[in-house]
Image (cartoon, helix red, strand yellow):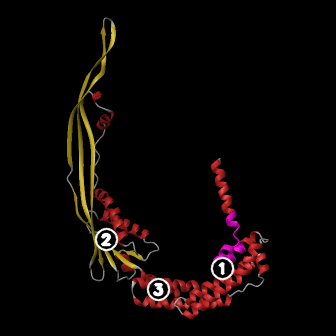
Amino acid sequence: MKGFNRFLFLSVIVFFITACSTGSTAYQRGDYYKACLESIDRLRANPKNVKSQDVLTKAYPLAQKTALREIDNALLANTPDKYDVLVFQYDRLNQLANDIFTCPKANELIPQPTQYIAELSKAKQMAAGQAYEMGIKALSIGTLDQARMAYQYFRNADRYVTGYKDVQNKIAEARYSATLRVMVQKPFENKNYQYSADFFYHDLLAELRRNSQNRFIRYYTPEEARIENMHNPHQVVILNFEDFSIGDVKETRDTKELKRDSVLVGEVKVDGKTYNSYNTVKAKLTIFRREINTGGTLSLRILDAQNSQELQRRDFIGNYNWNTKWANFNGDDRALNDKQKEMCTKEPNTPPTQQELFIELTKPIYSQAVSFIQSAYSRY
């Protein structure tokens, strides 16, 4: 209960401090825009707050002056982002005016806050044109990094003026040019395991694509590349299952003598009285084991599609051991424990098919291959 009371007390203090912000601290730091916002918020809750009234009347003209000075400086400096500055500052001044209009006490103190609607509209047009031209320039350089910059420029242009010129087409073009195109080839064509290899391949692609959403990378199958008329991948991932082998069925047996002392075997009468009879019981247990060992290696190579240079390579080794156990015995079953008795009731399991063995073999390889490829392309 004491802990709850302490938590309640601290919550009240935090609320009180937050609610009582009049904007004076921001004003003293020279952040006149924030000072205006805080004082307006305070006046919404308490229109009679004298301190907030004083802060707002002093801070608003200074916030205007500061924003207009930033605009003039940007135009004089003639930097590539000058119109971004204009949009930012005009937008803040308009937001400030709107907040004043929607707060009765603030509007009473400042009846006619200045709005810059026309100036903002013009600045957005200029900013959109500026971003569009910078996007065109970056896209013309022809590198992935510059194409990604172009993509952001075109997005900004569309944000400033929706549908500016042909910006939607430019966004799509820049996105394509900024995307690393990776063609992932299918594993070897072995008719005995092709279904399993295809299963591995499609699962691998699905996981890679989930990881690459909203990133500048795309994985293609050769079929998809043909359908989309994509003849210029940047890199190629080549998968190949090598040294896949299925061992012969191996059977072993292990026979052991079992005995258990002091087992009740009956009753005896001595001098007319009946007594339990105990003795040692014995049995011979034979445990059979049938197993198949499977092994293989996935070779994974990443090549530069332009010159076939090998960029990365890794071999992933997989092993899978299938086995089944059963048993039989001769003698007294009381010499066996429960587990041994249960084993004697079992029949040997049917060995899996080669397809099933191949699937089991690829399971540990799959996670390693996914992690390797994701790490290789983590920066895109």
Query: Circle 3 is placed at which residue position?
Result: 150
Whether residues under marks 3 and 1 lie with C-beta atoms below 8 angstroms apart, the answer is no
Please tell me whether residue 363 is drawn above or below residue 345 in the rendered image.
Answer: below
Q: Is residue 77 above or below residue 209?
A: below
Q: Quadrant of residue 92?
A: bottom right
Which of pointers 2 and 3 lies earlier in the amino acid sequence? 3
Q: Is residue 212 above or below residue 160?
A: above
Disc 3 element = helix
Query: What is the distance, in whole Å, between disc 2 and disc 3 at their CAs?
Result: 34 Å
Sequence-wise first label, 1 or 2? 1
Distance between mark 3 and mark 1 Cα atoms: 32 Å
Which residue lies at the image location 40% right of the left edge and 66% below the top edge? 207
The residue carrying mark 2 is: 186
* Quarter of the rendering containing residue 39: bottom right
Q: Which segment did they paint magenta?
A: 16-41
In this rendered view, identify the residue nearer to me: 147 or 352.
147
Q: Badge 2: how crowded within 10 Å, few (<14), some, or many (20+)?
A: some
Of residues 330 and 297, the one nearer the viewer is: 297
Give left or right: position of 262 versus 54: left
Q: Give the Cα distance between marks 1 and 2.
A: 60 Å
Give, as a three-letter code, the residue at label 3: Ala
Which residue was labeled with disc 1? 33
